[in-house]
């Protein structure tokens, strides 16, 4: 999961989750805790969550494979393949899906089994499922004092309804495609929204999420929005947005931390709303 350190409209510090994925990149950036364990977190995940998922499968029905899209880090795919092959003593295929949107229409998941389809139907909705899981978690634990904080998120938004949806959540947002790692669009003005509509989109429904922005961009803070704190200012009094990525794995014994990495934006957080969100 990826976290931002933010404040709410009352100035209270919060940690919020902006996105979760089943297997995010970042392990190659994590220093090894044991120089004798060359596969680092890749093997740990293989020994826990992966073997847990495979324990009831019949190895005679097929071979193991890593499916990876063009946006994925090659080190992640090969790292997992090497760790899985060494742990299972089996050959592991690496399958590159160069046009993930195209293949998403051909892959269908049912009961954790991937089926190859010959019809143009919608595939699995990974980002939608991850986002909705936050709401389900909060509903189940309502009243306990434990909750996941995340930006206001609207799911399954038709392409024709995106403009009105962004207006309702303050005029600035992040649009996410339901699949793939590159389908994220930051919208801060009409030109960027036009670029999104002009792009060749493969989907008709999207996720629209309220943009986490600078508190200086608005004259009045909104109760439903979060605002970046950034890191400690440098000698030029500039602060930078950063995130924190935490990766965990699980087995019968419980949850185990695998990776903790942080990334900093290349440019400082502007005191005014820029013309281009990049």
Image: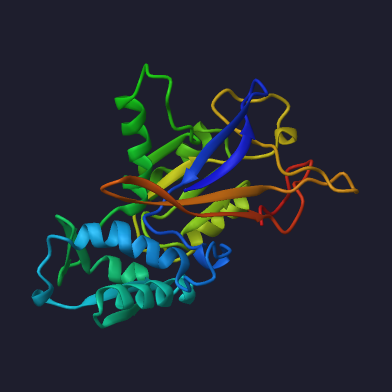
Residue at 53% x, 68% y: name it. 28
The furthest residue to the right: 235
Instruction: Provide residue 30's location: percent of width, then percent of height.
Output: 56, 62
Instruction: Provide residue 42's location: percent of width, then percent of height.
Output: 41, 67
Residue at 26% x, 83% y: name it. 91
Residue at 25% x, 66% y: name it. 105
Horizontal arrangement in the rendering, residue 45 relative to residue 53 (left or right): right
Residue 87 sits above or below residue 233 on the image? below
In the rendered image, which quarter is residue 276 located in? Answer: bottom right
Question: In the rendered view of the protein, which quadrant contains the C terminus?
Answer: bottom right
Colour scheme in the image?
Answer: rainbow
Of residues 215 and 30, which is closer to you in this image?
30
Instruction: Provide residue 212's location: percent of width, then percent of height.
Output: 60, 40
Res 78 visible: yes
Of residues 125 and 206, which is closer to you in this image?
125
Horizontal arrangement in the rendering, residue 92 relative to residue 3 (left or right): left
Instruction: Provide residue 75's location: percent of width, then percent of height.
Output: 48, 75
In the rendered image, which quarter is residue 85 located in? Answer: bottom left
Residue 15 sits above or below residue 273 on the image? above
Res 99 visible: no
Q: How many marks?
A: 0
Horizontal arrangement in the rendering, residue 187 relative to residue 100 (left or right): right
């Amino acid at each position: 999961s990826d976290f931002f350190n933010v404040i709410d409209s009352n100035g209270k510090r919060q940690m919020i989750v902006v996105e979760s994925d089943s297997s995010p990149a970042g392990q190659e950036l994590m220093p090894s805790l044991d120089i004798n364990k060359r596969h680092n977190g890749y093997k740990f995940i293989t020994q826990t969550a992966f073997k847990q998922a495979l324990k009831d499968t019949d190895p005679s029905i097929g071979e193991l494979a890593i499916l990876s899209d063009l946006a994925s880090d090659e080190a992640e795919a090969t790292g997992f393949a090497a760790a899985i092959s060494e742990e299972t003593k089996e050959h592991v295929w690496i399958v590159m899906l160069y046009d993930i949107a195209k293949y998403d229409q051909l892959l269908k998941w049912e009961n954790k089994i991937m089926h190859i389809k010959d019809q143009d139907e919608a595939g699995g909705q990974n980002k939608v499922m991850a986002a909705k899981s936050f709401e389900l978690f909060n509903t189940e634990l309502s009243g306990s004092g434990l909750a996941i904080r995340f930006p206001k998120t609207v799911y399954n938004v038709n392409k024709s309804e995106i403009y009105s949806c962004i207006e309702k959540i303050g005029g600035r947002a992040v649009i996410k495609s339901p699949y793939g790692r590159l389908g994220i669009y930051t919208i801060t003005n009409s030109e960027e929204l036009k670029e999104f509509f002009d792009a060749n989109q493969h989907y008709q429904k999207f996720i629209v999420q309220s943009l986490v922005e600078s508190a200086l961009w608005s004259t009045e803070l909104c109760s439903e929005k979060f605002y970046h704190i950034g890191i400690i200012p440098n000698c030029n009094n500039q602060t930078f947005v950063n995130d924190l990525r935490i990766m965990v794995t699980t087995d019968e014994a419980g949850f185990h931390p695998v990776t903790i990495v942080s990334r900093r934006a290349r440019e400082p957080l502007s005191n005014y709303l820029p013309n281009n969100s990049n």
